[in-house]
Image: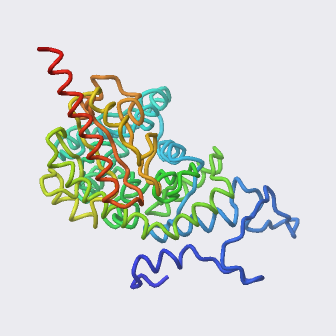
Amino acid sequence: MNNSLHFSTRLIKETLGVDPQTGAANVPVYLSSTFHQKDFDQFGKYDYTRSGNPTRDALEEAIAALEGGKRGFAFASGMAAISTAFLLLSAGDHAVVPKNVYGGTFRILTQVLGRFGIEHTFVDTTNLDEIEQAIRPNTKVIYVETPSNPTLCVTDIRAVAKLAKAHRCWTFVDNTFMTPVFQKPLELGADLVLHSATKFISGHSDVVAGLAVAGSEEIADRLYFLQNAFGAVLGVQDSWLLLRGLKTLDVRIRKSADSAQRIAEFFAVQPDVHQVFYPGLADHPGAELHADQASSGGAVLSFELENEASARAFVNHVHLPVFAVSLGAVESILSYPPKMSHAELNEEEREQAGIGSGLLRLSVGLEDADDLIRDFEGALANVHDQKLVIVRSGD
């Protein structure tokens, strides 16, 4: 594919598969678990769908091309992709991981991988000195989420990758929030990119999936072995749905990001909002770095109200967003991280990760930004009224 083409054009071309026999403009859904072999001694490219399927291949080739990697892999969930990536490590190996890492990744590290002798250290990955101090002789991976979930902290991918290479270890980057539309970790030096494709790449809250893209043939070969051995592959119909989601990814996430910028600016001046976490705001501590390695603030932001009671009042008085787990859909989704994405962390761990009791995360969808802001104005008015009632009752 011609890399001089604009990304939106490449996105369509990479996901369009014209069937040579029929001329069909969409990749066929190959609903077959097994494939006939014409030769007794030499099998064809496909033999069993766990090992490979033409529909899944089309998706894997598309995400590899869009991320600029050697090979892509489609898994049954984002956590299946992340877990398989960590299984590239062996007993006695060590990983450096963000202290505010996604709750599912935290669970795998603290409750599963440790039983197999894979060690980890949680650090503030926005602090390069802290990362370097955590590196040991047996460190094999520095794992990065940027922007992080849910506090949107920004980590310097180039600097981390350079540090990792100096210590002969890999850099894995969770690129779920930015997608290849806004950020290309492999071009910044990362070795492996991971996605919860359930989110923006699917975009319609109808698929659970994970994607990984390897930056080298070595990692690609080892990851394929694990994907095939463990079998947590993405189903054929879901692979087709992700291909369809990819086709509209560019226009969806750009509109959502434009709205998120406006909404973040709205929340930033509200007296009942204590803090807004969004790298598109000029006063975000990672704004300059983020602008250097990504082309947008993205479609996800978080904001902190006074406490859990204020967060409850806000959620109970909004009408447009869905109150749910997950993000990245055509509908706006409002989440409460302490009880949703980061419920695995105890109160002390959440505090260390900067996740306060009044924190809400908003994934901005395709609704009109003005309508969303009006809805949020009404909810904040109720939060303010509730605080006045509490103050008066204490008099």
Quadrant for the C terminus, please: top left
Reply above or below: 150 against 12.
above
Above or below — where is 221 with respect to 254? above
Name the residue located 34 percent from the left edge and 41 percent from the top edge: 139
Instruction: Tell me the residue at 58%/66% (across/down).
Output: 244
Quarter of the image where one finds residue 129? top left
Percent of width and height locating residue 104:
45, 36
Q: Position of residue 349 (x, y in %)?
A: 29, 27
How is the model colour-coded?
A: rainbow
Residue at (59%, 76%) from the top-left corner? 16
Image: 112 above or below 184: above
Identify which residue, 327 or 232, lies in the foreground: 327
Whole-percent x, y for residue 133 in the image = 20, 39
Residue drawn at 43 percent across, 40 percent down: 323
**Tally of marks:** 0
The picture quadrant where one finds residue 2 is bottom left
Left or right of 208 in this view: 392: left
Residue sitting nearer the eye, 102 or 322: 322
- Please state the horizontal and vertical placement of residue 18, each as a whole percent of the image: 66, 80
